[in-house]
Image (spheres, rainbow, N blue to C red):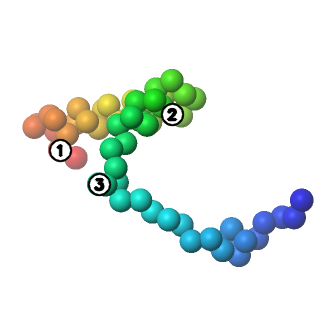
């Protein structure tokens, strides 16, 4: 197998998404039942949402 070079890796343009145009709730909720890292992402989302709702919390 050919070793990838920086040029190989960077040849494709990265496509970003506009997170304001999608509702990611379903995918984040489904992550609760996936691998450890996915569960931690869902847990972090829960914490972040609680922080947003807490008027005394500054982010």
- Residue 50, position as x, y percentages in the image: 23, 32
Q: Is residue 4 above or below residue 41?
A: below
Number of numbered discs on residues: 3
Whole-number angstrom distance, CA of label 2 to CA of label 1: 26 Å
Can you say which quadrant of the picture contains the N terminus? Answer: bottom right
Look at the numbered discs 1 and 3 and tell me whether their residues touch, using CB distance below 8 Å.
no
**Residue under pointer 1:** 58
**Residue under pointer 2:** 38
Viewer-side label of 2, 1:
2
Residue that appears at 73% across and 71% down: 8
- Residue 15, position as x, y percentages in the image: 50, 65
> Earlier along the polypeptide chain: callout 1 or callout 3?
3
Residue that appears at 78% across and 66% down: 4
Viewer-side label of 1, 3:
3
- Residue 22, position as x, y percentages in the image: 34, 49
Q: Is residue 38 left or right of residue 59?
A: right
* SS at mark 1 in the image: loop
> Earlier along the polypeptide chain: callout 2 or callout 1?
2
Label 1 crowding class (10 Å Cα cut-off): few <14, some 14-19, many 20+?
few
* SS at mark 2 in the image: helix
- Residue 28, position as x, y percentages in the image: 41, 35
Q: Is residue 12 left or right of residue 38?
A: right
Residue 40 visible from this viewpoint:
no
Look at the numbered discs 2 and 1 and tell me whether their residues touch, using CB distance below 8 Å.
no
* SS at mark 3 in the image: loop
Q: Is residue 20 left or right of residue 36?
A: left
Q: Which mark is residue 20?
A: 3
Whole-number angstrom distance, CA of label 1 to CA of label 3: 22 Å
């Amino acid at each position: 197998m050919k070793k990838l070079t920086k040029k190989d890796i960077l040849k494709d343009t990265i496509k970003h998404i506009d997170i304001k145009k999608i509702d990611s709730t379903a995918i984040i909720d489904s992550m609760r039942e996936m691998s450890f890292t996915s569960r931690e992402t869902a847990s972090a989302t829960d914490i972040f949402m609680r922080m947003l709702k807490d008027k005394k919390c500054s982010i």
